[in-house]
Amino acid sequence: MLRTLAIKDFAVVSELELSFSEGLNILSGETGAGKTILIEALGFLLGARGSASWVRTGGERLSVRGVFDPADFPEELKRSLGIGTEPVAVLRELDSGGKTRASVNGKSVPVAALSAWGDGLVDFHGQHEHQSLLKPSAQLAALDLYAGLGREAAGTAAAYERWAALCAEQDALKLSDEERGRRLEFSRFQLSELENAKLEPGEEARLSAELPLLKNGERIRNLAEAAYGALYEAEGSASEDLLKVSRALGDLARLDPGMEASAKAAEDARRVLDDVARDLGRYRDSVPLDPERLDAVLSRLDSLARLVKKHGGSVEAALERAAALAAEIHALETAGERAGKVEPELERAEAVLEKACDKLHSGRAKAAKTMEKTLVKELRGLGMPHAGFSVAVEMEEGRFSRSGCDAVEFLLAANPGEPARPLRAVASGGELSRVMLSLKTVLAGGREPTSQKARGILVFDEVDAGVGGAVARAVGARLAALGRTHQILCVTHLAQVACFGRGHMHVVKETVGGRTSVRVESLDRSRRLETLAVMLGGREPTTASRRHAQELLEST
């Protein structure tokens, strides 16, 4: 769950902070008010490419900071970044020179790692291109999820791993002694290189987070020392001055009870300042000044970069490569002992795999027909009465993979007479958003485990484009239902959709001091009623539009 989003010097946004609730969060405002900029800022925070032109005129850098629940992070990332049970602050900045940096709880992280995490957490639907369900592999997984084929898919993957290992072993047996010796020597060399490196999952992220502290240790310590002195040690320090104020107010409160609240506030402030000073002192003393450690970290990162470039692009991929090499070496070394045994084992393994693939294909084909009917019904309720939706499941025998022998593709014919096309080829953002809303609604009602259903943030940018009236209410109702299992951010112009939100923010573009900026109002019930009335009736609310807005709120 995204708790807050703070944006500074991003395009026409000077500075603002948004707070989000669980379920459906509405963003409304006039066309051009800046709603989509807020969505772009979230995308940037989660690893999307940025542009130096986004930095607000006069600013040195833009920044986007989001606070997320720790449950939004996979266990491996939690371990590598030291994430505990407290909310997690993610920050990304971009300066006017085009340089970007990112951090999680103050620890630097590669933007690529941020992007990989964001892709798994947030789905953008509408005017953005990185929707997960546009990928055929994700569509296949979605069909399995809808059909409840998780156990069958896992069994097929295990059967494939066994078959693939035996294929590799059979290939090794077919080599001549000379060829086998050369491959064995090369594989041993590669495995030795990987083993000697003593790779650890998440090591790159940990070292990358440590490096800035080591590089800037002296400057960081000097800054911390200066701040500590100003707070606590120097003559006339803030702590000393506040102590005098607190004592004076205490004496005053004894003479005039009306000053007790002020005296208590001053004493509370003094204690908070003392706590800050103590924390700052501990931090100052913990800052590393270790040139040898800096050299070691730089050398290690350089070695890792060269090693992972050769073996898959990441430490995790290199570790997988090491496991594969060990299996290959074992097969090569035992080739003589295994001669005559592998082929019958391979035949049995292939028969098991074929049976698993056939069973999985039958389940997918059957579920595809039900899914098509369910989705067409959903689309008709969302203002696409003539839409055709199909789930193509094609099986190529002998084309084995971890997911079986099937290729799955979702196809949409938005209007009569149009051919069905893959979702990634659908041009209309509004149509695509409604398809995605239908898919998410159908999947949320499937056999997905509850722990997974509650994960994920969905962003719909003008999902209601081109609809109104009863269809708009249907869109709002679907979003509200989906909000029971996901956090949703929805940009909308329609009161019939906005009335379903648990939280409602209104975006306003204004000119202050000759400069344009964006302001966001978090609406209470009375202000929300007025905003919905304006959305229904024009620039100024009327008695009729207020009454209609009241009816909308009461009916949700």
Image (spheres, rainbow, N blue to C red):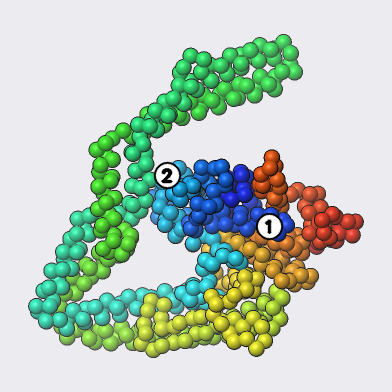
Report the residue at 38% width, 45% height from top: 209
* Residue for badge 1: 32
How much space separates mark 1 and mark 2, taking CA atoms?
Answer: 36 Å
Q: Is residue 301 above or below residue 466?
A: above
Would residue 60 appear left or right of 13 to someone viewing this image?
left
| Rendered-image quadrant of the N terminus | bottom right
Which residue is more in the foreground, 378 or 79? 378
Report the residue at 43% width, 29% height from top: 224
Rendered location of residue 355, percent (x, y): 39, 86
Three-letter amino acid code at the position of disc 1:
Gly
Q: Dot 2: within a 10 Å radius of its alpha carbon, few (fewer than 14), some, or many (20 or more) residues?
A: many
Report the residue at 54% width, 67% height from top: 129
Going by the picture, which residue comes out furthest to the right? 543
* Residue for badge 2: 107
Would residue 357 appear left or right of 195 to someone viewing this image?
right
Would residue 520 appear left or right of 486 to someone viewing this image?
right
